[in-house]
Every structure is written in C-alpha cells, then in structure tokens.
Image: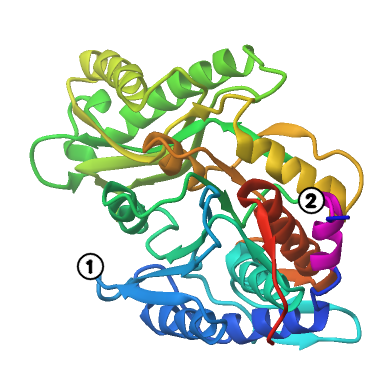
Amino acid sequence: MAESPAQLARRVAGAVSERRVMEETYRFISVPSPTGAEAEFAHVYAGVLDDLGLEVRLDEEFPSSPSVVARLEGSGGGPTLQLDGHTDTVPVSHDESSIDLARGIVRGRGAADMKGGLAAICEAVRALQEAGVRPAGDVLVTAHGLHEAPLGDQRTLRSLLRRNIAGDAAVIAELGHDHLATASRGMSIFRIRVHREGAPMHEVELREPISNPIAAVRLLLDRLDERAAELAGRPDDFAGPETLFLGEVHSGDFYNRVPVEATLVGTRRYRPPATTEQVRAELEALCREVAAETGLDLEVGLQEVGPAYALDPTEPVIAAVRHGYEAVVGGELPLAAAQAVGNAADFVSFGVPAVYHGVNQQTAHSDDEHVSGSDLARAARVLAASVIHFCGVEEKETTR
C-alpha cells in the first residue's frame, strides 16, 4: 500500500540531521553579508545547492547583491513550490560566530535572521533526496539580498517576480515558527524634514521663537502622539492595532545656535485595505497644520517597506504547511498575522500566495543572535513536509 503524504513526511523528517543543519548554519554566518554586500555569501549558497544536484544560476542584475535561483525538478504534473529567503543581515557588528554542538546552539549575525532558515531549506531538499522522495512538482529555491531596510528596498526580489521567476506559491523560511501568517500589516518608514530659510544664527538673534525648527518638532511630537493614541484605540484581534512609532529626532549642531532644519524618522504600520498613499496623505495633513502655525517648510518622505495584505484562507499553500507541520511536529499550526514586515507582501503583490515558516527569530538583530539546533531541524522538517503536501510526490530509490 502506498504511503500517505503524512507518512512520507514523517519518513523524510527522519532524514533531517540536526548536526548537519547546525554546521551549515555556522558555515553560512561565518561569511559576512551585510545589506548591499551579499555577493560572497550568494556564491557560497549557490555552491551548496549545486552540490545537492539542483539546477543553479546566479542572477547578477545587481552585481554586489546577486540572487540565487535554483530548481529541483519534479517528476511532472504537480505545482511548483518556491522556498525563499534573503541573504543579507543587518549591518550591525556581532561577537565572533560560534557553534556549540553539545548544547545545540549556533551564535552569530544572521543565525536567526535568516541564514538558519536558508540552511533549513538546504536540509529540507537534502532530506527529500536521502529519503528517496521526488516531488511531483518542482521546488524552486530563491535567495536574494537588499532586504533589510532602510538600505534594502526589495529590488532584487521584485525584479525576479517581475520576470516571473516564481512558483505557484511560496514559503519564506523566516518568522512563523509557531504560527502561520496569512496576513500582515503594511509598513512605511517616514522622514519628516522641517526647514527654515537662512543660515544658522546665535540664539540672541532669533526674533520669532516659533521660527526655530525645534518649535515645529514640539508641535509635531504632540500631533504624532495624538494620532498614535487614536490608532491604538482601534484594535484588531487578528492583525493587531495600526501603529505610528517615532524612533529618531535630529536637530542642531551647537547649544546656542538656532538650527536650520530638523528631521523626524519613524514607522507607520497599517492594516489592509489601507495603502502607502493614504499614509502619505495622513502625514502631509499633519505637516500642513504645523507649517501653518510656524511658517516653516515641512516635507514628508516615505519609503514603503511592504504593503498590507491578507491571503484567502483557502489557498492550498496554507493547508500544505499546516498539514506538514501536523505530520512532523504534531498539533495544529494556528493562523495569525505577521507582526513584522517581510517578503510575503512582495509575493502577494505579484499574485503569488506566500506564507512564512522558519526558525524562532526572537533574537534577530540583537547583540546575542542565536538559534537552536532543534529549531533548525524542526524548520527543515516542516519545509520538506510542506513540499510533499503541496507538490505531491513520486517515490524513487535513493542514490545518495
């Protein structure tokens, strides 16, 4: 009697090696790849996929941030599942990377976000091969840089998607280790610039106190705080509240010089169906009020990190990952909204249903970024099981 998809998934899960995926993660984080300088690591990742027998090429439209495109050809007749991840890490220093096999911990920049997820993709493919299970549909593996904002603007992935280098659905190997995100708030980074005519001057020469850009900052802070409180009062049980967060305020260069300008930088997270254009209009309205009161010039700059989206709950990829999780982990993988913004928003914008499933990212971007071997292995097992449930399978004798 033929094995059921759940039985196949459990057999493939047994081929996952925790030690191997830990060592691969350590190898990956030992090659620095801050945003905008991912080429060396992209070549390393492409080499691992090539060694696994995938058809691999480097897309070098952006030479310092090339994308890896690899395909595990299926037997035919099934849909293509894309396993995706970003190759860059935040450009923040970290203590020297390390691996502790006895305690099951890999430490270093990118361990959690998201070279551990990229290693889990490799281990999932390797486990399918070693268990002698060939997907009916293709498995497309993509890895790209220029992800981490603000330097990262997703141009690499969006270029691939514009050229239809995509699967029928995608699983991104980050976030969602204990839930399945089927929706996300959008997020834009805003930069408000306050400017006055003239040059810096001594404080005693200032005739109108309100003409000091810092006076406009005070008014803006009040209005932004009022708007943030208003948004917090409109909760959503699934996606959470919309938010307005201020993280930077800059002005002045000396204690008794009147500055020429001030800058405020923060984020605005919003639920569907809101758009970046609506966020811009909201902030520009606040700035017009302050400009009218102060006579200063205010400009709003906006960088869209990712739009808001919500998947149709009947999308096959949702069922595939949930069935895969149940088969190899046990229990139900609950549906939720992603709290962070990632590349699923880009996929959905191009018509490709996408969800997340990777390692626990609680320490991502921290000074002690790390991931456990058991978590890496769990992610690899779920990814492999998701391939089985989404693509279908053809069993074959292993030759490895």
The residue sitting at 36% across, 75% down in the picture is 57
- Is residue 256 found inside the magenta-colored segment of the image? no
Q: How many marks?
A: 2
Residues under numbered marks 2 and 1 in contact, where contact means CB atoms less than 8 Å apart: no
Q: Secondary structure at mark 1?
A: loop
Main secondary structure found in the magenta portion: helix
Residues shaded magenta? 3-13
Residue 346 picture quarter: top left
Q: Which mark is residue 61?
A: 1
Image-based side of 43 in relation to 12, left or right: left
Q: Amino acid type of disc 1?
A: Glu
Q: Nearer the viewer, residue 201 or 26?
A: 26
Callout 2: few (<14), some (14-19), or many (20+) C-alpha neighbours within 10 Å? Answer: some
The residue sitting at 45% across, 40% down in the picture is 352
The residue sitting at 66% across, 17% down in the picture is 236
The residue sitting at 81% across, 74% down in the picture is 15
Q: Point out the frontmost of discs 2 and 1.
A: 2
- Is residue 5 found inside the magenta-colored segment of the image? yes
- Residue extending farthest left: 198
Q: Which mark is residue 5?
A: 2
